[in-house]
Amino acid sequence: MSKPLIMHMITTAKNLSPFDVNMAYDSGWDKCVPYTSIETDEVESIVQDAIFSRPPGLNKTGIFIGGRDPHKAIDMLNICKNSLVPPFTISCFADPSGAFTTAAGMIAKVENVLLKKFDKKFSGLKVVILGGTGPVGLTAGILASLAGAEVVIMGRDKEKCEKVASLCKEKYLDSSSKIFGAGNDELDSYIKDIDVVLASAAAGIQLVTEEQLKNAVNLKVAADVNAVPPSGIAGLDAMQDAKELEGSTSGALGIGALAIGNVKYQAQNKLLKKMANSEKPVFLDFHDALELAREYVSSK
């Protein structure tokens, strides 16, 4: 009798995300077992219980790390990796609140549009991320910065934004990276020089007005992960996919939440399948999510 594919799903929250459970089953995992309200120091024992209960090798077993805190998710992913006792191994995938795959979908879509429509890459461009202190925003900020952009993490609390930008630089970037924090009330002072706007604020909150959009004379691409009206960016529809923004004086192209969500879904599905099919242990995070998101976008 063939052993089932078992996914042990860890979250710091009190409930596991139904989205992640559905994704795991739909990508081929046979069993999904939840571990809720888990702290970092509990991860090692979960991993070792999982690896020692089956013969050496991967043995159709995986760990998924959810929750909401991207930094804690990465810490847990590293603990998973360091808890292995070869030849007893396991594969792990971190995607807290879907942030890694959502941010990867956003970045992959934007850079594809930049290249095809403007013959530009992220390198050297000015990028503002609205709602930038949340898990999707800060992950998108890291990925854009890694691609060479000058990034401003923007939110209601300037001090919090500055701390998030500093932490991202300390943990994932190098000293030459240009990533900063700013308050939402500073958007007007940035708007004329911005090349790309990435919106990841809470649903139903508009942060870029029609007037600001008119003043964004260098804007090339605007993307929003919010599918709930009103859009985070004036004139941007959730269904929009690289179509010109109504009211944009620069001819900027908009990418809506559903266009991004499709890429996010494909990336997460492919990563879950990669865990199931890999012959060696893999440890997957936002870097891997972006790689697969890029592959999917470039194939369309």
Image (cartoon, helix red, strand yellow):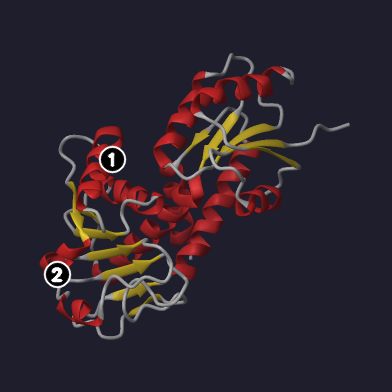
When the figure is inspected, residue 286 is found, relative to residue 210, above or below; the finding is above
User: Which residue reaches farthest right?
Assistant: 1
Callout 2, which amino acid? Asp
In the picture of the structure, the residue carrying the numbered disc 2 is 188
Residue in the foreground of this view, choosing between 121 and 128: 128
Residue 291 x %, y %:
43, 47
When the figure is inspected, residue 3 is found, relative to residue 196, above or below; the finding is above
Q: What's the residue at 44%, 48% (across, down)?
A: 100
Residue 162 x %, y %:
20, 46
Residue in the foreground of this view, choosing between 10 and 36: 36
Q: Quick check: can you spot residue 89? A: no
Give the SS element for disc 1: helix
When the figure is inspected, residue 270 is found, relative to residue 219, above or below; the finding is above
When the figure is inspected, residue 204 is found, relative to residue 156, above or below; the finding is below
Q: Could you say which quadrant of the image residue 202 lies in? A: bottom left
* Disc sitting over residue 168 in the figure: 1
